[in-house]
Amino acid sequence: MIAAKNKTLFKTDQSAALGVMKELNEQKKNTFLIPTRFLSVKAAEVAFLFNEYINWGEHEEGKKLYRTFFINSCYEALHGAIKLVRHHVNKSRVLKGKPILVYDSTLEFSLFIDPFKQGMEEALVPNIQIVSTLGEVEQALAGKPAISAVVIRYDLDTLTTTLSAIFEKCRKNGIYTILEDAHIDLSSRQSAIHMLTTKPDIIVTGESLTGYEVPFGAFSMNENMHQPWSMMGNSVLHTSTYGGNNLAIQMVYRNFAEKASFLFMDEKISSHLKKISENNSEVHKAFSTYINPGLYKFLQMLGYDFVTTSAFGSKITVQNLAGEKKELLDCISGGGAVNQGHNPSDLVNEVLQKHDPNIDYWDKLKTVTCKVTPFSHFFPSVSGSSAVENALICALLANKDRKKIVTFSRNFAGKSLISLIATVNKMWTAPFGPLYHNVVYVNPFLPNAGEKLTTILTQNDVALVWFELVQGDSSKEIPSELLNIVNKHKEKSGYLVGIDEVLAGCLRHGRLFSYQGKIENPDIITLSKSLSYSSFPTGMTLTTEEVYKRAKAYMPAVVTFLESHYVNNLGSHIALHSIRKFTSADFQGQVKKVAEILETGMKELADQSPVIREVAGKGHMYMLYYKENFVTKMFGKVGYTFYTFYLCQQFAKATGNLLYMDRCLPPLTLTEAEAKVLISDLKSFFSKKPSMWHLYKFINKMLVASFSK
């Protein structure tokens, strides 16, 4: 039996984080930028430090290259590690289909993986077996093991001699291994990883590396383990909007400097750190070596292979590998996380300097959110993905006698193993199964979509209808006919309705929330990017009183855990400031003025351009659909994808505007003058067809790079 936990992971004293945020803001250093990750000096240094820390004490011949993926929590990092293991396992004739065994003395992991206690096959993340003693792990490894991987959630009572024996047996049997050291103490030269005689394939760390002040997680893997994701074609299979943000990375770097000073006293290590900090080319090299060589190639192909030297409002100044600097209008805006523009001018005076750790800002945030929404209960998160997880779990608990989830094709919900349930794109899901199976997908743009949806919703077995009203993957709205069907059958059929507002919410698509005027009474919504105030990874799930009561009555321990675990006082203060800004009449009026310029301009662009077939979207959220040409047709679907990369790269070079591939997501603080220049540049650039010869060469180059090691 798991006891109900009502305690947050984070400290209330966040003075170090306040200092770093103030410094980043005043020095005009970006916190977020590109959702797939971006080059930064500190990220390169921290990834190098992870490699050196893991290898500390090893003889030269015993050292391995470790690459590190940065994310938003230890829990999310463990999901990423399991996904990588599954990518290997699903390609193995011997291991495919065998479960992953997780040792967790607290059984906390099962609160997420199998909150309904239905067993491995019916769990939210199937085929994971959780045990609470090392004896059960040793028993599973006896004889001919029937498992594909072992995960150890390390605690101080775990004997490293026992772990070494377990990892060695796994190594001999070709079984993958993951060690999660959630509370790692860098000051010890004898941490768990250093006392092991056989190292695991992947090491997972978390919030302790920011002193429990800022959301953070990481998983570090040896080069062979990383191989499937080190090719450019696979390098974005796992991504995170907030992952590798400069706030968290700066905090981790300072933690290394303070607690692992022995690394900095090593002449070879300190010399290499100095090279990275002073030499632009070393930043690029370190990113490729210690983070991901395939991702570095991907950034190169898009023209994103730069280091940002300053960022303010809608503009960033970047430096390329050659050392050349250029100012760009940022229409990536962190994939929507930079809604308020880079380094908002009021952040320091209105939030950071006024922050009082004795005030419960989470309580204040809930009170204010109650006033501006129809929701009464709130669950904190550290990302959009974790907000969606909370939503799916709460909905299924509240509708406990039903298990079916309905969503729409091309919906995007995140890339954790639970949020992938509602991410409808085989490219993101296929390598990582099995996933939760009780999901039905409806293509909203097929002629028979209404008929199919009606049939599904009237069978009285649907627990939840979950979707983005405006799809982030296409910038297209779900047709009103389908929304009417969802509204019509909701009460009689007994399903819940949840709306993902992570991207489209909080004015990006016009209204305060995208569901307003379209979905009558949603039961659950999620927010994240819009709450970050361009500076702090945060989010939350909002539910009605009825959903909360029903979920808590069924599984009180799970609900209590979810509503407290990720409460972050500083993050709550920032989210509170964000909500107040979004609900300000002055701010809403300014956003509307700029949106009108963008909407008119985008319509004219679609009508006039010989290159563009359609522009989908409105407000501050658009997607460009290009006309096919004989070169793209020659290469098929992949040719069109690379065509979008080519145009993105060329547009930035020609005009100084940075698109997110084929998407245009300017911050809500975009000025009227900037909007007019952006539209003018789009019209000018897309008034001419690109060179077919240059496009052909680019696509060929991309194809070679995609699958080369």
Image (cartoon, grey):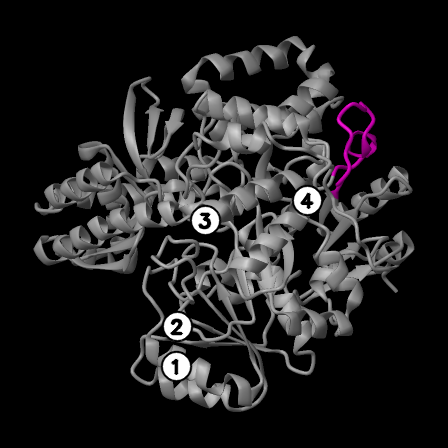
Q: Which residues are magenta?
A: 180-199
Task: Name the residue beneath numbered marker 4.
Answer: 74
Q: Residues within 10 Å of mark 4 (few under 14, many from 20)?
A: many
Residue 249 position in % (x across, y down): 58, 30
The CA distance from mark 3 to mark 1 is 39 Å
Point out which mark residue 518 bears: 2
Vertical placement of 175 versus 290: above or below?
A: below
The CA distance from mark 1 to mark 4 is 40 Å
Quarter of the C terminus within the rendering: top left
Q: Residues within 10 Å of mark 3 (few under 14, many from 20)?
A: some
The tag earlier along the polypeptide, 3 or 1, is 3
Task: Name the residue beneath numbered marker 1.
Answer: 484
User: Which amino acid lies under the numbered mark 2 shown in the image of this protein?
Assistant: Lys
Residue 513 position in % (x across, y down): 43, 60
Front position in the image: 548 or 456: 548
User: Regarding mark 4 in the picture, which secondary structure is present there?
Assistant: helix
Judge from the rendering whether residue 635 lies leftward or rightward of residue 383; answer left or right: left
User: Regarding mark 2 in the picture, which secondary structure is present there?
Assistant: loop
